[in-house]
Image (cartoon, rainbow, N blue to C red):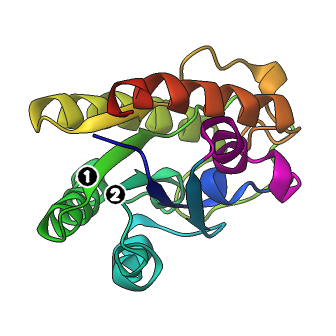
Amino acid sequence: MNLKKIVCIGDSLTAGYGIQTSHRWSNLLSNDLNIEIINSGISGDTTSGMLARFYEMAIKHKPNYIIITGGTNDIWLNFPNNIIIGNILAMTRYAKHHDIIPIIGIPTPFFNQGDFTDVSPFIDVSSLSKRINSFQKTLKQFALDDNQHFIDFTLNMNPDLFLIDGLHPNEKGHKLMSVNAKLSLKGFS
């Protein structure tokens, strides 16, 4: 297998919320591996939104691989894990139908340090970190059980690698995300 073209689809963790485009993990990975990586991340998106735009913003580019990283906003809206996993499952099957290898991105953690100011009518901030943590474990187990490739973006993450909101990685966090992605993709090149 050769890494030729990758599409990354996801939410703000993919889009690079709060940092310059040149410092987001997908751009760092593209430069490091010297391959084309198309970033189709949209801040605030849910897995159902990703699924709805999957053809236009992922399949249509005819990549070899699609990295699917989502779920944090679904959790913010208090969607159950089985709905989120179902959307991710649909995207993996859609990719495989088009002879594209899907890779599931396990979302980064939430380090609530009291500076997260967003208010959700669906879930309280104190529950958000627990729900994200539970979802990460559920998604990783799904990937293992379904024989899916995955990138664990949680590896070695700590509060110093996040913006003040504790939810979005800073430039150093994106650098680590790129390293984690490269380690997972090592077997593909």
Picture quarter with the C terminus: top left
* Residue placed most toward the observer, 162 or 34: 34
N-term-proximal mark, 2 vs 1:
2
Label 1 SS: strand
* Residue 117 x, y percent position in the rendering: 83, 51
> Cβ–Cβ below 8 Å for labels 2 and 1?
yes
Residue 140 placement: quadrant: top left
The magenta-colored residue range is 19-34
**Residue on which disc 1 sits:** 101
The answer to whether 52 is drawn above or below residue 172 in the figure is: below
Residue closest to the eye, 93 or 11: 93
Classify mark 2: helix, strand or loop. Answer: loop
In percent of the image, x 52 and y 62: which residue is there? 122
Q: Quick one: label 2, few (<14), some, or many (20+) residues within 10 Å?
A: some
Q: Which residue is mark 2?
A: 64
Give the residue furthest to the top.
156
Please tell me whether residue 127 is drawn above or below residue 50 in the rendered image. Answer: above
Q: Amino acid at mark 1?
A: Ile
127 or 62, which lies in front?
A: 62
Q: Is residue 81 magenta?
A: no
Taking 62 as reference, is 85 left or right?
A: left
Cα–Cα span, label 2 and label 1: 6 Å
Q: Is most of the magenta stretch helix, strand or loop?
A: helix
Q: Nearer the viewer, mark 2 or mark 1?
A: 2
